Image: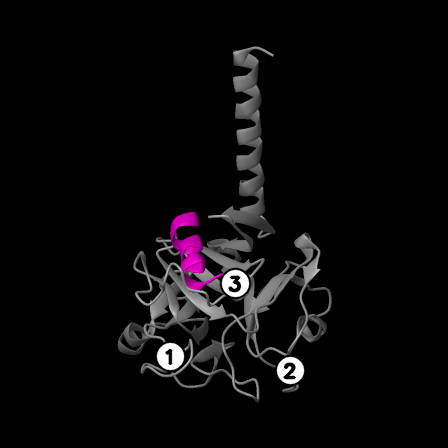
Amino acid sequence: MTNWTRLLCRLGVAAGGLMALTIQAAAAECGRMEHDGQSYSLCTITADEEPRLGLWIDDAEGNKLRNFSNLRAALPAGRDLVFAMNAGMFHSDYEPVGFYKSDGETRGQLVTGGGGGNFGLLPNGVFCTGGAQPFAVIESRAFAEKQPQCRLATQSGPMLVIDGELHPRFLVDSDSLYVRNGVGVSADGQTAWFAISDRPVNFHSFGRLFRDGLGARNALYFDGSISRLHAPSLNRSDFGWPMGPIIGLVDEG
């Protein structure tokens, strides 16, 4: 094989990979990504898909969903999930620890003070969709001050990335390792990345995925004790302890 042939082959592979990523993003499919020696499952959605993003705790009768199977059963006939994951911390009754908004209903209170556990590791933040930008991650005290309009909103903590910087409390050599999940948003607010680690990682590694691997300007942690993903394109639907808030993308039917 000549050098010129090798170059053409490499260009073809690169172009094919770029095309696959483009198709994947447009179709809101999920894939896997390697970053700094760690493996992640990643679902990417763009602004035109925001109206099909949903946030749920219970079904139409008020029964707590608690898992992906119940959520799928609660969807309108002919509709299904492109993907879903847990979307923030919750109390023993599965109600959100912080602020939550879906379908015009608000639940929980915005928490701006510090406290125990990861949620209280300030700064924490709110993932907001359908506002001034399709997607945003907003620090909680700024959210309280600005009172932005959101179609969907879920508060969690800590922030993973704040204005392009990692959370100041993250340690590169921390031995606190969990399967972690969260969401990051592009600088222009047109893209949201939902990611879960394929094996236990620390906060520093998970934050770098969003900041360095994806270029997220802001990113929010969802959980590490209960982190699950439903992604049919990956032949994956995690099960385990019941969940509170669940976020997911519904197909076009």
Q: Relative to residue 183, is residue 142 depicted above or below? A: below
Residue 140, located in which quarter of the rendered image?
A: bottom left
Q: Secondary structure at mark 1?
A: loop
Residue 247 percent location from the top left of the image: 55, 69
Q: Which residue is mark 1?
A: 120
Amino acid type of the residue tagged 1 in the rendering = Gly
Question: Label 3 belongs to which residue?
Answer: 51
**Per the image, is 146 magenta?**
no
The residue depicted at 59 percent of the width and 50 percent of the height is: 31
- Could you tell me if the residues under marks 3 and 1 are in contact, i.e. CB atoms within 8 Å? no
Q: On the picture, is 50 further left or further right than 30? A: left
Of badges 3 and 1, nearer the viewer stands: 1
In the rendered structure, the answer to whether residue 109 lies left or right of residue 65 reads left
Residue under the image location 52 percent in, 24 percent down = 11
Which residue is rendered at x = 56% and y = 63% of the image?
52
Q: Earlier in the sequence, mark 3 or mark 2?
A: 3
| Marks 3/2: CA–CA distance | 19 Å
Quarter holding the C terminus is bottom right
Which amino acid type corresponds to the residue marked 2 in the rendered image?
Answer: Ala
Whether 181 is drawn above or below 233: the answer is: below
**Which quarter of the figure is the N terminus placed in?**
top right
Q: Give the mark, 2 or 1, whose residue is nearer the N terminus.
A: 2
Dot 1 alpha-carbon crowd within 10 angstroms: few under 14, some 14 to 19, many 20 or more: some
Residue where numbered disc 2 is placed: 60
